[in-house]
Amino acid sequence: MLKTDKEQIVAELAADLSAAETLIVADYRGLKNKQLEALRDQLLEHGARFRIVKNTLTRRAAKQAGAEALLVMLEGPTAIAFIEATGDPAAVAKALATTAKATNVLTLRGGILEGKVLSGDEVDQLATLPPFDVLRAQLVGAIVAPLTQLLVLVSAPLRDLHGLIDARIKQLEEQEQLVEPAAAVAGEEPATEDATPDTGETADVEQAAEAEHAAEVHEADGTSGEAATDTPSETDTPSDSASAESDDQEGSADPASAESAAHELAETEKEEEE
């Protein structure tokens, strides 16, 4: 390899080490090319680039990038998984650990997680963590849970007040429903009252009727008094009654006697004229 090519590789490695905040170092010794290609494709899905490097060139690049903590991991055949900012470190560690168990040849040496140096065992622990999306959801839940509890405590009085207001509105609506039929009945009562004369007017009419009846009675009493004056009273003396009876008897004499008397009177007058 030419010197210029080596210098170019060192510059690229130094740039990758400076840009990558998280990386994992593994010993790929014993892996076949087909297995390496499958592992690269799997790591790309999780936002990582799996690159095989020479230790001599990587040491020079680490010194240039200021990543001296990486130097202790550069022993034997080395491959580095550079994890991008949008990648999932836990998923990358899990994919490497799964391949190591499946092949029994891949070994995790360690890594750097956002500036913190990790050992091989710590990388294995990282592989046991849930995926990044799940961790983010759990983190959000842990942050939101106290806020939710606080919101519940704050909103409880408002919720109770809202319940009281709803109950009061319902009570008023029920009262209005009861008042409407009563108002309808009250609206019909004035017509009945108009048809019935007022008590005061009734009293006046009754008094007028009584006065008119008293006048009629008084007038009738006057007429009966006059009739009593013309008619003999029951207290007349017996002599008056006898005279009246004799007059009646004279008036009721026999008609035959009256005719004979008249005949005699007529003959007497005739003789006198002769």
Image (cartoon, grey):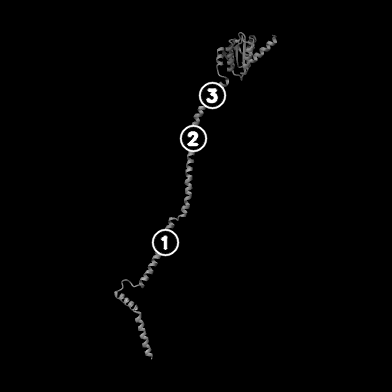
Q: Amino acid at mark 1?
A: Ala
* Mark 3 or mark 2: whose residue is earlier in sequence: 3
Q: Which residue is mark 2?
A: 163
Examine the image and state in which quarter residue 226 appears: bottom left
Q: List the single residue furthest toward the left.
A: 238
Q: Nearer the viewer, residue 274 or 98?
A: 274
Total numbered circles: 3
Q: Amino acid at mark 2?
A: Gly
**Whole-percent x and y of residue 177?**
48, 43
Name the residue located 40 percent from the left edge and 63 percent from the top edge.
Answer: 213
Q: List the single residue furthest toward the bottom.
A: 274
The tag on residue 209 is: 1
Q: Nearer the viewer, residue 116 or 161?
A: 161
**Whole-percent x and y of residue 163?**
49, 35
Question: Which type of secondary structure does the marked residue at label 1 adopt?
Answer: helix
Name the residue located 54 percent from the left edge and 24 percent from the top edge.
Answer: 141
Q: Which residue is mark 3?
A: 141
Examine the image and state in which quarter residue 264 appears: bottom left
| Quarter that holds the C terminus | bottom left
Q: Mark 3 vs mark 1: give the one in front.
A: 1
Q: Amino acid at mark 3?
A: Gly
Q: Nearer the viewer, residue 27 or 260?
A: 260
**Whole-percent x and y of residue 178?**
47, 43
Question: Which type of secondary structure does the marked residue at label 2 adopt?
Answer: helix
The tag on residue 107 is: none
**Whole-percent x and y of residue 232?**
34, 73
The answer to whether residue 87 is left or right of residue 196 is right
